[in-house]
Amino acid sequence: MAAYVISLPALERNARILRETADAAGCRIVLALKGFSCWKAFDAIRPHLDGCCASGLWEGLLARDHFGKHIVTYSPGYTEDDIRQLCEFTHHLDFNSLSQWFRFREIVMAHPRFESGELLCGLRVNPQCSTGDTPLYDPCVAGSRLGITADQLEGADLTGLSGLHFHTLCEQNSDDLEKTLVAVEEKFGHLLRSPQFTYLNMGGGHWITKPFYDRERLIHLVKETRAKYDVEVWLEPGEAAAIHTGVLRSEVLDVFDSAGHKLVILDISATAHMPDVLEMPYRPDVFLVESSKGQVPSSNEEKQPAVTFEGERYVPGMEKSAILHRLGGPTCLAGDVTGDFAFPRALVPGDVLVFDDMAHYTMVKTTTFNGVKHPDIVLQHEDGTLETIREFSYPDFRDRLA
Ligand SMILES: Cc1ncc(COP(=O)(O)O)c(C=O)c1O
């Protein structure tokens, strides 16, 4: 049975690291719901983070209803209805363009929450400083639609605004933030120095919970920024909150040979259930599940999936050697393939494979393309017990379109 299994203790571990970082730096850290919005798991995160980053009205409503605390909202485009509803509960409302701000500022500035200072507005800026390797994830590419460039702000009427927001990183270390902050100073330092601007949101993409991430440098940069501009600093990571907290378990439905390849059809799909594998693209870690009965438990040094069960042993899929399998999904898309992986033995129908690190940017993006059954969503509690929080059935597929 296909299932996303999310470890609550692992989520809490990440959230604690984020809290420690925020406390040391004197900034606020919120969970970017675009990366992880499995709200029944929020109890593990809520005590440690300052709130949520919403990508628009619906995530904002989810944050209000199931997380609470602070809500910071930014969308590349709002409707008037979005604005009217968001004004009721969001704390930051950041705009992607001057035209959107000019279009809606009267509505926002007339709202009692704006007048009382409970609702603050900001602009997303584009510091035009590319530091990543993947153009698909680079908001600073030439012609980017994300954020306002410094030349567009010259002479503009900025009355009513009190924050700036930039998001330029993706799975990056704090050295790239350092480079970005140099560009921010060069292009927007004069605004941040003016007393009108009271917050700076540094977006997401900070890989804070990765073991090699240089947290000390982040802490130093945030402190320096706060002191230089006298602003509140906000970070809104998604991936760092949910990294290495969940897996996607799947079953082998079929194995057959074709043109020299051992082809495997699984009950999960790259395009429907882990689309970043194809979009980014990247090669996830995969493990074959074997029974551990009578086996010496694997050493802690061996790579293990984010969620493990007693009685199971996890044999990593390798790039070469042994028996190479091409892992594919049950959809019609010819490229619905997660990759070629070798295992010490040939797979057979009924085998279970575990795809590692599948909590973030998976469940928020899934589809029922081809009517493929959506994997269950399961939480693993501190004591190892499992709680299935969502099972999907035919009506879920049918009712989405009418
Ligand atoms: C504006 C904004 N904030 C925050 C995030 C979260 O980024 P990440 O999950 O890489 O930390 C994103 C991701 O695309 C984003 O676009």
Image (cartoon, helix red, strand yellow):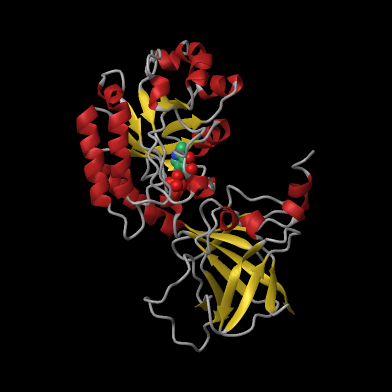
For this orientation, the residue located farthest to the front is: 142
Left or right of 221 in this view: 279: right
Q: Nearer the viewer, residue 134 or 356?
A: 134
Look at the picture and state if 289 lies above or below 337.
below
Residue depicted at 63% across the width and 59% down the height: 270
For this orientation, the residue located farthest to the bottom is: 294
Look at the image and tell me whether residue 123 can be seen. yes
Look at the picture and state if 187 lies above or below 9.
above
Q: The C terminus is located in which quarter?
A: top right
Left or right of 62 in this view: 92: left
Q: Nearer the viewer, residue 347 or 291?
A: 347
Left or right of 52 in this view: 56: right
Rendering coords of residue 35 (x, y %):
50, 47
Rendering coords of residue 279 (x, y %):
58, 53
Rendering coords of residue 224 (x, y %):
21, 37
Rendering coords of residue 214 (x, y %):
28, 53
Residue depicted at 40% across the width and 12% down the height: 157
Number of marks in the image?
0
Look at the image and tell me whether residue 120 can be seen. no
